[in-house]
């Protein structure tokens, strides 16, 4: 596929062969910066054969490619305007340039400003060789909840029993608008849960990221792209999602954007109030005793999450070829959890009550400069980014033993802060004559984490806590400096596409932990310098089908949440929790073979070999009746995954081919079921399992049905059956069924939806975790069945004027937080 603009063609010295003026009414050509997609086809025997697809900016389209004699059709497509087709003939004796009769583009009668468009088709899912793109904003099943909820429903995404996410069996790094999220674990999960999915334009599932991505990205990347479309004048939308079961969960939001001359802007603000509950049961057998000791721990958590967010972004078009983008995001949270716990078994009878409070805030600031360096398509992208995250959780607990004696335990407070700064650049050098592109770039990143914890464990006096005097103190400091450079080349030879890249990464890491009055617990300092290659080969079978193979080497630095020795969770005489400061980085070798067809079908397999992988386990010291929750390093963890994604076109089955072809370009009006199947088999060294290790096959189904009275019904179902997921034995299927009904009113300016999630209240985690001297049957059940009423009202100027801020480059941004 070629991407050509008028200035490029002249700069390369090729004489113009074809010229077409395609103007927009009431918009002078000198002010027209709208991007067009131009399709060139040859007319043979009353059928059309594709010649090429081109892009141009502005009124004038010029083609330097010489065409042989024959009849042709040229179709001009641009967002918000009807397609225009021009037919012409090239005669054998034609002396020179062909100037076609001018055409005027007419505005579409319906407002499609909020529709995701790929080419001239409206699609919710687009499968490519290296990634899958899923539209979120216009998909009612995905857009009415949180970003975390939406991501969990995407093809190939599986939430592990510990709450982390995987993509086709591999770990993922999270990107938001290409910017890194240095938060990890529950902090990142809570942040994504606070970000409404209605702010998301699309999600890119990138299966095997190349050298342009951070090597610190495990095996896959999820890039969450927020809404960036701008409309002329001032426009706004109001959205509210009212969720309820026996708890109340309202989430109002307002979005305002606009565009005036060279400046475009957008603001979004909202508030989440979520009440909920979580029930946890740990049925534990301590195997070092003779006879073995058996206890059952139960915890009931009542949670209140309150979160305010504000997101603002501006883009100023400095010139026709350069943009300056400034974004600022802030999230302010105030959460509260009360816990009632009990421990029963043998001679043990213990009950407890605790109260945890957590105030945290996130600030993100990014400045990006994007420009085309010349008319040959060379581009430069420079980004400066800052991310600040802090939290101040406090915990206070009381307990009663079998003698009914009351005492305090795990009283403490934590002061946590994370600062992340980076500066990066990316350069792209396309050589269109040779179908060759060279990308290069670099990055310098600084991450600083400080966490100061103060505690009173098993204290007999509540006055100690109230006075602010603590008997124990743990200070944790983590610093990471990362310098990286990469180079990546892409070459096309006929139907073969070759990619090869190499990334240099240098990590300077220091971890420190001290207890009480400066007593050192552990101090670790190391340098880690490595080269990370990647290579891929894709073969185009035809325009609609291709097969590809990929290899990449990656690394994962241990996250702060698994290193930090501080603990603010429930703690008593039967439980402890601590970070593992001595964890090593994990190295990954990722292999993948994949076949894609018609932008909807994909089948493939990947194999990941990881060294020094860490996973969350429960262990016990010999002769102690205390369960310790911590991350443990394993020598090797190998994962084989096979996957299949395909749609079932219900319109073709029940309405026939003609009706199916009518709807194929408007996916929002089609009836279909999208199926995704994942087979995952894990092999681990360094752990003996008390259960049979079996692979798991995960199934997910998403359907859309068009009902009478213009009602759209969407349904979603997933199931993770029994088997072995990494190191966890799934003892009961994890499953959920959701259903949704949506309708548009007032020329699509008002959208109303009714939803029910986890209809059968079946989503719960039951897993067996094998550790040293301890086997734990773990059960967790949230109040996942709830109802939702969603309402969105759009108002303002509905006339679309494209904000041409995108400068095409064949690279991706870097950074990323890990969900484990």
Image: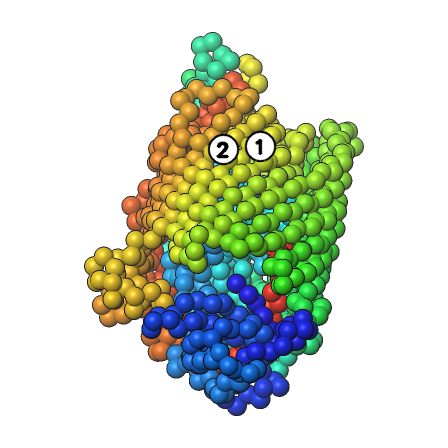
* Residues at marks 2 and 1, CA–CA distance in whole angstroms: 8 Å
Q: Which residue is mark 1?
A: 610
Q: Residue at x 57, y 67 (%)?
A: 3
Outermost top residue: 290
| Earlier sequence position, callout 2 versus callout 1 | 1
Q: Which mark is residue 357?
A: none
Residue 584 image offset from top left, x and y in percent: 66, 31
In the depicted view, which residue is nearer to us: 766 or 317? 317
Work out whether 315 lies above or below 774.
below
- What colour scheme has been applied to the protein in the rendered image? rainbow
In the depicted view, which residue is nearer to us: 273 or 259? 259
Quarter where residue 407 is shown: top right
Are the residues tagged 2 and 1 within 8 Å (C-beta)?
Answer: yes
Q: Residue at x 58, y 86 (%)?
A: 29
In the depicted view, which residue is nearer to us: 38 or 72? 72
Residue 772 image offset from top left, x and y in percent: 53, 20
Mark 2 Cα-neighbour bin, 10 Å: few <14, some 14–19, many ≥20: many
Q: Residue at x 52, y 63 (%)?
A: 1
Work out whether 579 lies above or below 481.
above
Check disc 2 and report its element: helix, strand or loop.
Answer: strand
Check disc 1 and report its element: helix, strand or loop.
Answer: strand
In the depicted view, which residue is nearer to us: 256 or 431? 431
Work out whether 820 lies above or below 714.
above
Outermost front residue: 93
Observer able to see residue 64: yes
Question: Which quadrant is the C terminus positioned in?
Answer: top right
Q: Which residue is mark 2?
A: 639
Observer able to see residue 81: no
């Amino acid at each position: 596929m070629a991407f050509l603009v008028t200035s490029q063609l002249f700069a390369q010295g090729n004489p113009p062969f074809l010229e077409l003026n395609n103007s927009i009414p009431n918009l002078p050509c000198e002010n027209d910066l709208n991007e067009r997609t131009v399709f060139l086809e040859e007319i043979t025997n009353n059928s059309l054969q594709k010649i090429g697809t081109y892009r141009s900016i502005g009124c004038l389209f010029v083609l330097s490619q010489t065409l042989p004699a024959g009849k042709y059709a040229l179709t001009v497509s641009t967002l918000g305007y009807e397609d225009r087709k021009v037919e012409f003939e090239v005669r054998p004796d034609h002396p020179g340039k062909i100037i076609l009769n001018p055409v005027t583009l007419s505005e579409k009668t319906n407002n499609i400003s909020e529709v995701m468009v790929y080419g001239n088709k409206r699609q919710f899912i687009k499968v490519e060789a290296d990634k899958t793109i899923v539209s979120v904003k216009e998909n009612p099943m995905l857009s009415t909840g949180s970003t975390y909820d939406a991501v969990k429903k995407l093809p190939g995404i599986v939430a592990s029993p510990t709450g982390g996410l995987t993509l086709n069996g591999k770990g993922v790094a999270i990107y938001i608008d290409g910017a890194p999220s240095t938060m990890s674990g529950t902090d990142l999960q809570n942040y994504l849960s606070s970000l409404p999915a209605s702010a998301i334009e699309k999600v890119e599932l990138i299966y095997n990221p190349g050298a342009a991505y951070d090597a610190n990205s495990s095996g896959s990347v999820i890039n969450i792209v927020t809404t960036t479309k701008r409309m002329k004048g001032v426009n706004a939308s109001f959205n509210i999602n009212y969720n309820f079961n026996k708890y109340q969960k309202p989430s109002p939001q307002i979005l305002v954007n606009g565009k005036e001359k060279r400046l475009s802007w957008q603001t979004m603000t909202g508030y989440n109030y979520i009440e909920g509950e979580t029930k946890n049961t740990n049925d534990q057998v301590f195997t070092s005793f003779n006879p073995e000791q058996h206890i059952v721990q139960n915890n009931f958590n009542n949670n209140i999450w309150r979160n305010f967010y504000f997101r603002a972004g501006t883009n100023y078009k400095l010139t026709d070829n350069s943009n300056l983008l400034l974004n600022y995001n802030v999230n302010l949270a105030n959460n509260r959890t009360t816990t009632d716990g009990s421990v029963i078994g043998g001679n043990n009878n213990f009950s407890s009550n605790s109260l945890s409070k957590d105030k945290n805030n996130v600030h993100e600031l990014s400045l990006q400069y994007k420009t085309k360096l010349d008319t040959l398509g060379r581009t430069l992208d420079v980004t400066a980014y800052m991310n600040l995250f802090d939290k101040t959780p406090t915990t206070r607990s009381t307990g009663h033993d079998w003698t009914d004696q009351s005492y305090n335990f795990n009283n403490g407070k934590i002061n946590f802060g994370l600062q992340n700064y980076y500066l990066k650049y990316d350069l792209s050098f396309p050589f269109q004559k040779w179908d060759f592109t060279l990308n290069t770039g670099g990055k310098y990143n600084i991450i600083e984490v400080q966490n100061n914890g103060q505690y009173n464990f098993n204290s007999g006096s509540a006055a100690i806590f109230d006075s602010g005097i603590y008997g124990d103190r743990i200070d944790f400091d983590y610093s990471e400096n990362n310098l990286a450079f990469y180079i990546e080349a892409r070459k096309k030879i006929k139907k073969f596409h070759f990619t090869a890249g190499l990334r240099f990464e240098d990590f300077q890491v220091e971890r420190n932990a001290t207890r009480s009055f400066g007593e050192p617990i552990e101090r670790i300092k190391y340098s880690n310098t490595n080269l990370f290659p990647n290579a891929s080969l894709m073969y185009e079978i035809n325009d609609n089908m291709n097969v590809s193979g990929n290899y990449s080497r990656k690394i994962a630095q241990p996250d702060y949440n698994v290193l930090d020795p501080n603990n603010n969770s429930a703690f008593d005489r039967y439980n402890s929790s601590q970070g593992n400061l001595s964890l090593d980085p994990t190295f990954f070798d990722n292999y993948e073979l994949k076949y894609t067809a018609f932008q909807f079908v994909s089948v493939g397999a990947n194999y990941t070999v990881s060294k020094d992988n860490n996973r969350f386990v429960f262990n016990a010291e010999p002769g102690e009746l205390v369960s310790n929750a911590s991350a443990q390093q394993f020598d090797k963890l190998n994962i084989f995954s096979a996957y299949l994604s395909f749609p079932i076109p219900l319109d073709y089955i029940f309405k026939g081919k003609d009706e199916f072809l009518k709807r194929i370009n408007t996916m929002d009006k089609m009836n279909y079921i999208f199926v995704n199947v994942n087979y995952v088999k894990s092999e681990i060294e360094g752990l003996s399992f008390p259960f049979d290790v079996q692979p798991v096959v995960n199934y997910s189904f998403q359907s859309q049905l068009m009902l009478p009275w213009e009602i759209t019904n969407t349904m979603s179902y997933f199931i993770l059956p029994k088997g072995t997921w990494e190191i966890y034995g799934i003892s009961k299927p994890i499953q959920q069924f959701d259903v949704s009904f949506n309708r548009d009113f007032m020329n699509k300016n008002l959208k109303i939806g009714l939803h029910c999630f986890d209809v059968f209240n079946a989503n719960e985690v039951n897993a067996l975790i094998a550790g040293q001297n301890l086997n734990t049957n773990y059960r967790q059940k949230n109040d996942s069945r709830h109802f939702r009423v969603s309402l969105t009202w759009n108002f303002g100027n509905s006339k679309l004027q494209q904000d041409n801020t995108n400068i095409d480059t064949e690279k991706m941004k870097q950074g990323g937080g890990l969900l484990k």
